[in-house]
Amino acid sequence: MKQFVIPELGENIHSATIVKVLIKPGDIVEIEQSVLEVETDKATIEVPSDVSGKVVEVKVKDGDQVEIGQAIFSVEDAGGASVASEAPKAEEPKVEEKTIVEEKQPTPQEQAVQAEKPAEPEAKALEQPTVALSGNLPSDSPKIIKIENQPPLSAQAAPAAPSVRRLAREIGVDVNEIKGTGPGGRISLDDVKFHSKRLHQQRNEIQHIRAEQHQEPLPDFSKYGDVETVAMSNIRYKTAEHLSYAWHTIPHVTQFDKADITQLEEFRKGYAKAAEKFGVKLTVTAILVKVIASAMKTFPQFNASVDMQNKSIVYKKYFNIGIAVDTEHGLIVPVVKNADTMNIIEITKEINVLAEKARNKKIGVADMQGGCFTISNLGGIGGTSFTPIVNSPEVAILGVSKGSIEPVYIDGKFEPRLMLPLSLSYDHRLIDGADAIRFLRWVIEALENPLKLIIEG
Ligand code: CAO
């Protein structure tokens, strides 16, 4: 028998809710066939199979909560014979006595000796067959390692002395999550304490936000009329938490302005036939992605994150732009990676692919990670202006409302011009008002005179 287990679904995702089981006993499954629809904290995604054959037993049902690495169903080959296990017998797991999970407690003398020794290459002790990973994963995801019935562990075991591991265990910290500051990433006692303090602070912040969210009990609405209560989806709940966190921690300011896109729109329409040859329809959103990536090069503080704990600012040297996409299962923000290296046709294609994936629940967690700045274009729907919330830990977001013809006073007379309303919300801890308006003016000038992109971008 071959088992299908829940593959790793992305960084910091440990569990998921099964929205729909897409296979049943007797079905023949193929590699890459979607077998489950799951909802994580970040997205609803279809999980492809990494096994093929006839489904014998399905161990879960719709609505179940499952852990990464948990067995979901087993298959035998389509003819009915058992499928050989993926790992050849000779490579069956050899669970060594000393692993991170079952660590033999050293005596105080052993501990003193071991503490002096360089870190043991503990990953070696964990050499086990890896569980095959499936399509939605980033190619650089750590492989899952399974030790018989133990939960999966990272192949990169953390280098730390037993005394350090013991302290981490005693205070309830996962040593594998700590970034060591010693040589070769070795974890010290101070690293454990610092990590614990940081977790504690984060927990306090989240509790504070939750307390605020739960401050006022709801009245009994049914006294006034019929009501229906439905459970929040994971995405909705996490979006609510994430936005509350951003709203609570970031001092927001929103700067409004308008770009005259009359010429740009003429060019966009004029270029439509040429764009068709590339199989795309040129859109304002794609042009904005290019303009913003260029503006971030001129204004590096817009491509940064604030680290209050370490009293530092992280400047990013890559230019990844998130696009807010409206889907029927909620707001999703896929990321156009390295937008500065792409031309507008390539950006348009990438937005189409990502938006399609988001709307068809095919989006992977990696598609939504690594953003530096977000664009939220509501103009296709309407609106004259709005105040978008910064997508923490980013420091700015551009809201785009509906472009419309307005009378603009030029050279002593009113002229009808196509004006695009822009709303730039920013984190005032890092960005001052003057910086914000300079940034927004740069964006507007690039939209009004695209040559600026070639000369300065
Ligand atoms: N002003 C006027 N018209 C606009 C416009 C704007 N700001 N932006 C888009 N349009 C027009 C387009 O030109 C297109 O018109 P034509 O068919 O005549 O050319 C039409 O609206 C539809 O555009 P689109 O939505 O297909 O393409 P897009 O690249 O402009 O937008 C995307 C892509 C993914 C941003 C968009 O589909 C979307 O999901 N927007 C909603 C984002 C959202 O929900 N933000 C809120 C987040 S906070 O809650």
Image: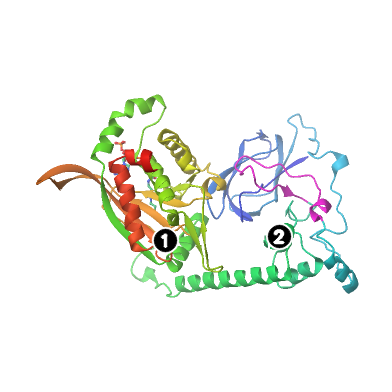
* Ligand 1 quarter of the rendering: top left
Mark 2 burial class by Cα count in 10 Å: few <14, some 14-19, many 20+: some
Q: Quadrant of the C terminus?
A: top left
Residue 155: x and y in percent read 74, 51
Image mark count? 2
Which of the two residues, 48 or 97, is positioned nearer the viewer here?
A: 97
Main secondary-structure element of the magenta-colored stretch: loop
Magenta part of the chain:
121-146
Left or right of 381 on screen, residue 84: right
Left or right of 372 on screen, residue 223: left
Q: Quadrant of the N terminus?
A: top right
The numbered mark at residue 228 is 1
Which of the two residues, 341 or 110, is positioned nearer the viewer here?
A: 341
Q: Are marks 2 and 1 in contact (CB under 8 Å)?
A: no
Residue 427 seen: yes
Which of the two residues, 399 or 288, is positioned nearer the viewer here?
A: 288
Residue 387 seen: no
Q: Which residue is mark 2?
A: 176
Q: What's the residue at 35%, 25% (across, down)?
A: 274
The numbered mark at residue 98 is none
Left or right of 440 on screen, residue 99: right
Quadrant of the rendered image containing residue 80 = top right
Q: Is residue 76 magenta?
A: no
Quadrant of the rendered image containing residue 58 = top right
Left or right of 113 on screen, residue 252: left
Outermost residue on the front side: it is 455
The mark that comes first in sequence, 2 or 1, is: 2
The amino acid type, in three-letter code, at marker 2 is: Asn
The amino acid type, in three-letter code, at marker 1 is: Glu
Q: What's the residue at 35%, 58% (across, down)?
A: 436
